[in-house]
Each structure stands twice: as structure tokens, then as C-alpha cells.
């Protein structure tokens, strides 16, 4: 099982498997229709209680119809809380702000929130394969898998949870286009005599409406730190002149790899 590094969080390798959420284009419908997948939300608010005392994270992820992703992060360790935002533009530029002195470590990567979002959605898929439209009332979740591994993947690493694993909890409607969940995920770390049991709690809200993206195209870039996934991206020279989010997007459209 591969671990993912998140500075100052002190989270175990079992807790931080690196992955990404594979998002489809944002839905325009205001209600959840048959065929909607758990991987289709326009917004996810996710709380994760990690193994250990006081290790907790809240991530709120927004998906733009233009393909961009925004994550609000609040990361809590026993001795500190770090808050900030990370914005991924066209999968190429990463903008971040907040996070205090840990801006470079915590703001420049979407690995940790992407991991936990993907894990939550994978567990929801197993709990109710019919998708969010199949949840008409409160549903108790009790799944044990002794065979199938959970595979997770991101831009920069891969990971997963080996079987056996289990998930228990509840899923319930929270309006016509939202589903609330509270899941306890139990897993095994290591093998043989070195095997240890681990657990984490994932709870939150998946919103399948098509709300407006919370950062406007006219937003100034002054408060954001900009980094690039490819240091040779052809848009970098033109992007240096951009003053707004829309101008940065235009520079990328005009200078494709």
C-alpha cells in the first residue's frame, strides 16, 4: 500500500493513500436522475477523522463546468490548524492561498483531498451500486469484502487498501439533489505478524445540483500563489502577464502543450 505525504498532519501511511477523484462534467439537472453515479457530484463536503488523537480534516470540493476544481481545506493536528484553498485550472496550473507558513507544502498538491474524496465515493458505490438516485430514505450500510482491493490513483502516486476491509454507517437523502453519508471504514495495514487494524470515519454531503462555481473569472490573481504541474508548460510566459482568473485560462487555451 502506497502512502501519500501531507506535511504536519502526522497521518499514518494507511490513512493517506494517494488518489484522485475522477470527475465527469458537471450536471445541469436540479434533481438526481437514474443513472447518476456517485462520482458525479458538483460539490462534496467531506469530514475525515484519521487514526490517532486529534487528526482531522475537512475538505469542500467544487467542480466547475469548465473543468476546474476548487478545494477548501481545514487540516487539524493536535498542535495546529491549517486552512487554505487550492484551485486546479485545466489540470495544468495549481493556484493556492492560505495555509500560512505551510503554503508550499499543503497548498500546491491536491493529493490528500483527492484521495479521501475518491475513497468516500468508492465506498458509496459499494454500499449502493444503484447510485444516489436509489437512496429514497435512510439506508444502513454494512459491507464486508474479503477479496477485492480498493485501488486509488492520483497524478503523482498510486495506492490502495488490500482486502479484507469493511464499511458500516448510513446514507440518507438531504433534499432532492443531495445525499448525506456517515461511514466507518475499517482496514488492515501490513500482513502476517505485522498486520494491524486501522479505521477512519468519513462523513459528509454529496451535492448533485449545478451550483455556480464560487470563484468568478474576474477574480484577481494577486492573493494566489501559482505553480505548474509541468515546468515546461508553454502557457507559462503568457500567464505571467495575466491579472485575473479568466486571463490565466485564456493564456492556457492559446498555448496548449
Image (cartoon, rainbow, N blue to C red):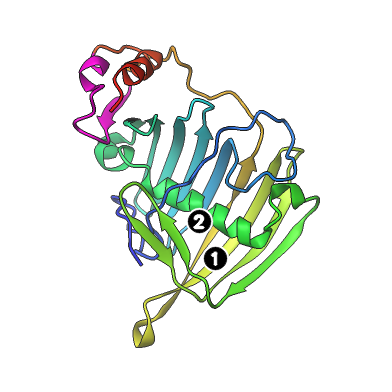
Percent position (x, y) of residue 147?
53, 76
Q: Is residue 54 visible?
A: no
The answer to which image quadrant residue 126 occupies is: bottom right
x and y percentages locating residue 37 in the rendered image: 64, 47
Q: Quadrant of residue 82?
A: top left
Front of the two marks 2 and 1: 2
Q: To which residue does mark 2 refer?
A: 119
Give the residue displayed 37% in from the left and 47% down from the top.
Answer: 111
- In the picture, the disc for residue 185 is 1
- Judge the density around disc 1: few (<14), some (14-19), many (≥20) Cα neighbours within 10 Å: some
Query: Disc 2 or 1, which lies upstream in sequence?
Result: 2
Q: Compare residues 231 and 120 and report the one nearer the observer.
A: 231
* Callout 2 touching callout 1 (CB < 8 Å): yes
> Where's residue 11, x and y in %?
36, 59
Secondary structure found at label 1: strand
Tag 2 secondary structure: helix
- x, y percent for residue 185: 54, 65
Check the picture and name the quadrant holding the N terminus. Answer: bottom left
**Residue drawn at 35 percent across, 31 percent down:** 98
Q: Is residue 76 visible?
A: yes
Asked if residue 229 is among those painted magenta in the image, a careful observer would answer: yes
The span from disc 2 to disc 1 (Cα, nearest Å) is 10 Å
Instruction: Give the answer, above or below, for where 144 lies relative to 83.
Output: below
Q: Residue drawn 45% across and 72% down?
A: 162
Magenta span: 222-240
Q: Which mark is residue 136?
A: none
Amino acid at each position: 500500500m502506497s502512502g501519500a505525504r501531507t506535511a504536519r498532519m502526522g497521518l499514518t501511511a494507511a490513512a493517506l493513500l494517494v488518489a484522485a477523484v475522477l470527475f465527469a462534467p458537471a450536471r445541469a439537472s436540479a434533481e438526481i436522475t437514474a443513472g447518476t453515479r456517485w462520482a458525479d457530484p458538483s460539490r462534496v463536503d467531506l469530514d475525515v477523522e484519521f487514526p490517532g488523537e486529534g487528526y482531522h480534516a475537512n475538505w469542500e470540493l467544487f467542480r466547475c463546468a469548465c473543468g476546474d476544481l476548487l478545494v477548501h481545506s481545514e487540516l487539524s493536528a493536535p498542535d495546529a490548524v491549517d486552512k487554505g484553498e487550492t484551485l486546479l485550472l485545466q489540470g495544468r496550473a495549481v493556484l493556492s492561498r492560505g495555509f500560512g507558513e505551510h503554503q508550499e507544502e499543503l497548498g500546491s498538491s491536491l493529493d490528500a483531498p483527492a484521495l479521501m474524496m475518491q475513497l468516500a465515493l468508492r465506498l458509496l458505490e459499494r454500499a449502493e451500486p444503484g447510485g444516489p438516485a436509489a437512496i429514497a430514505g435512510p439506508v444502513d450500510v454494512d459491507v464486508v469484502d474479503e477479496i477485492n482491493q480498493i485501488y486509488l490513483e492520483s497524478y503523482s502516486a498510486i495506492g490502495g487498501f488490500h482486502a479484507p476491509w469493511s464499511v458500516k454507517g448510513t446514507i440518507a437523502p438531504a433534499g432532492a439533489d443531495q445525499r448525506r453519508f456517515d461511514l466507518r471504514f475499517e482496514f488492515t495495514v501490513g500482513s502476517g505478524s505485522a498486520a494491524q487494524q486501522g479505521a477512519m470515519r468519513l462523513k459528509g454531503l454529496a451535492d448533485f445540483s449545478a451550483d455556480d462555481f464560487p470563484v468568478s473569472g474576474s477574480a484577481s490573481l494577486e492573493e494566489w500563489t501559482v505553480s505548474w504541474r509541468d515546468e515546461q508548460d508553454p502557457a507559462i510566459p503568457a500567464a505571467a502577464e495575466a491579472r485575473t482568473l479568466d486571463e490565466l485560462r485564456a493564456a492556457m487555451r492559446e498555448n496548449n502543450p
